[in-house]
C-alpha cells in the first residue's frame, strides 16, 4: 500500500483549541471560549520563553557601529542575546572578534564610558520596548543632520536614552540644561528628518546594547553581529498556524488543555492533575529534543605567571 507522500500535517489555532478543550471534557460552543483560549495560548508561549531557549526563535542580526556611539537599539521582541561578536572587514577580509558580556553593575563602574577603541565589552539593557508621550516639545526647528536638540524642558527625561519626534527615533547620549547632546539620528530603522518647533517628544524604553569602549574607527569599520532569542508570535485571529514547529505541537496542546482546565470550574480537580502531569511530560519530551545536538568541547586555558 502506497504512503501519502506528504509530511505537511499542521494544526491551525482553531484545531488546537478544539483538541485542548476535548482533553478537558468540555465541548466548545461559544465565541468566548475561543477568546479565552487565545488568551491562554499567548500566556503559554510567554511561559515557554521563561522556561528556556526555544531554538526555532533564534535569529541572527547585525548593527553597523558608528564612531562615538555607545548605545544601539535592538528589536523590541528580543528576549535576550545568546552570542555576539564584533566583525571587522568584509568578504575574504572578514574577522569576527569576541566581545564579552558584562552586567549592569560592572558597566556602571567604568569611570570613562566615552573611552574610545575597539569595543571589547557589552552590557545588554533588556527594556520593555514601551513608550509614553510627554508634555515636552521641540523648542526650535531642527535639520536631519543636527546632533544637538533644544527642548522646552528636559524634566523627567533619563540622562541618556531614546526619544521619538514625529516618525524618527533619536538616541541622545547626554543632557545639558534643556538640550540633548551627542544625538544619533534615524535609530531603530527610522529615517533622519527635519522637525518643526512644537513637535511632541515621546520617550521610548527600547531594549539596547551599550558597548565599551566607544567605537573609534571611522567609516563604520565595526559591525556588532548577534544571535538573539525572540518572542514567539501571537496567536492571531484563530485562522493562523502557530509560530511553533511540528515537534512541539503535542506539548502545546497539552499545555493549553491544562491552562483551560485550571480556569474551567466544571473540570474536576483530579482531571486537572492529570492534564498537568501530561503537560509536564510533553514539555520534558519537547525540551529534551529541542536542544543543540553538537558535542561539547573543553579546552584548558594555560596561564603563565
Image (cartoon, rainbow, N blue to C red):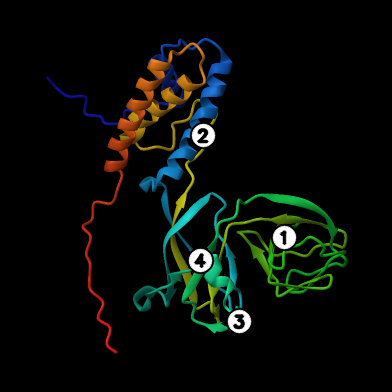
Horizontally, residue 116 falls left or right of residue 169, namely left
Horizontally, residue 18 falls left or right of residue 136, namely left
Q: Nearer the viewer, residue 95 or 254?
A: 254
For marks 3 and 1, the one nearer the N-term is 3
Q: Which residue is mark 2?
A: 43
Give the quadrant of the N terminus.
top left
Residues at marks 1 and 2, CA–CA distance in whole angstroms: 30 Å
Query: Secondary structure under badge 3?
Result: loop
Viewer-nearest of discs 3 and 1:
3
Where residue 219 appears, as percent x and y from the top left, is 55, 80
Q: Quadrant of residue 277?
A: top left
Where residue 101 appears, as percent x and y from the top left, is 46, 68
| Image height of 144 relative to 290, above or below | below
Q: Which residue is mark 1?
A: 163
Query: Secondary structure under badge 2?
Result: helix
Q: Residues within 10 Å of mark 2 (few under 14, many from 20)?
A: some
Q: Which residue is mark 3?
A: 112
Q: Residues within 10 Å of mark 4 (few under 14, many from 20)?
A: few
- The residue drawn where x is 30% and y is 48% is 291
Residues at marks 3 and 1, CA–CA distance in whole angstroms: 24 Å
| Image height of 226 relative to 20, above or below | below
Q: Residues within 10 Å of mark 1 (few under 14, many from 20)?
A: many
Q: Which residue is mark 4?
A: 103
Amino acid at each position: 500500500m502506497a504512503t501519502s507522500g506528504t509530511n505537511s500535517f499542521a494544526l491551525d489555532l482553531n484545531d488546537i483549541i478544539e483538541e485542548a478543550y476535548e482533553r478537558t471534557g468540555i465541548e466548545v460552543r461559544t465565541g468566548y471560549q475561543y477568546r479565552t483560549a487565545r488568551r491562554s495560548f499567548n500566556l503559554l508561549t510567554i511561559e515557554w520563553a521563561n522556561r528556556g531557549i526555544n531554538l526555532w526563535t533564534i535569529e541572527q542580526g547585525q548593527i553597523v557601529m558608528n564612531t562615538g556611539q555607545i548605545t544601539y537599539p535592538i528589536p523590541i521582541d528580543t528576549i535576550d542575546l545568546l552570542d555576539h561578536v564584533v566583525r571587522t572587514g568584509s568578504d575574504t577580509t572578514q574577522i569576527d572578534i569576541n566581545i564579552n558580556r558584562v552586567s549592569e553593575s560592572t558597566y556602571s563602574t567604568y569611570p570613562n564610558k566615552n573611552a574610545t577603541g575597539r569595543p571589547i565589552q557589552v552590557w545588554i539593557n533588556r527594556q520593555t520596548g514601551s513608550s509614553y508621550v510627554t508634555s515636552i516639545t521641540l523648542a526650535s526647528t531642527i535639520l536631519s543632520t543636527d546632533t544637538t536638540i533644544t527642548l522646552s524642558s528636559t524634566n523627567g527625561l533619563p540622562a541618556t536614552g531614546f526619544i521619538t519626534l514625529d516618525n524618527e527615533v533619536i538616541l541622545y547620549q547626554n543632557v545639558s540644561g534643556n538640550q540633548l547632546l551627542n544625538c544619533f539620528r534615524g535609530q531603530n530603522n527610522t529615517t533622519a528628518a527635519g522637525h518643526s518647533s512644537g513637535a511632541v517628544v515621546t520617550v521610548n524604553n527600547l531594549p539596547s546594547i551599550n558597548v565599551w569602549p566607544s567605537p573609534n574607527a571611522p567609516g563604520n569599520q565595526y559591525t556588532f553581529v548577534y544571535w538573539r532569542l525572540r518572542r514567539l508570535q501571537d496567536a492571531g485571529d484563530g485562522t493562523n498556524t502557530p509560530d511553533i514547529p511540528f515537534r512541539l505541537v503535542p506539548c502545546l496542546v497539552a499545555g493549553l488543555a491544562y491552562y483551560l482546565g485550571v480556569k474551567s470550574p466544571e473540570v474536576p480537580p483530579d482531571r486537572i492533575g492529570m492534564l498537568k502531569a501530561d503537560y509536564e511530560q510533553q514539555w520534558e519530551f519537547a525540551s529534551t529534543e529541542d536542544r543543540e545536538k553538537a558535542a561539547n568541547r573543553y579546552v584548558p586555558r594555560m596561564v603563565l605567571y
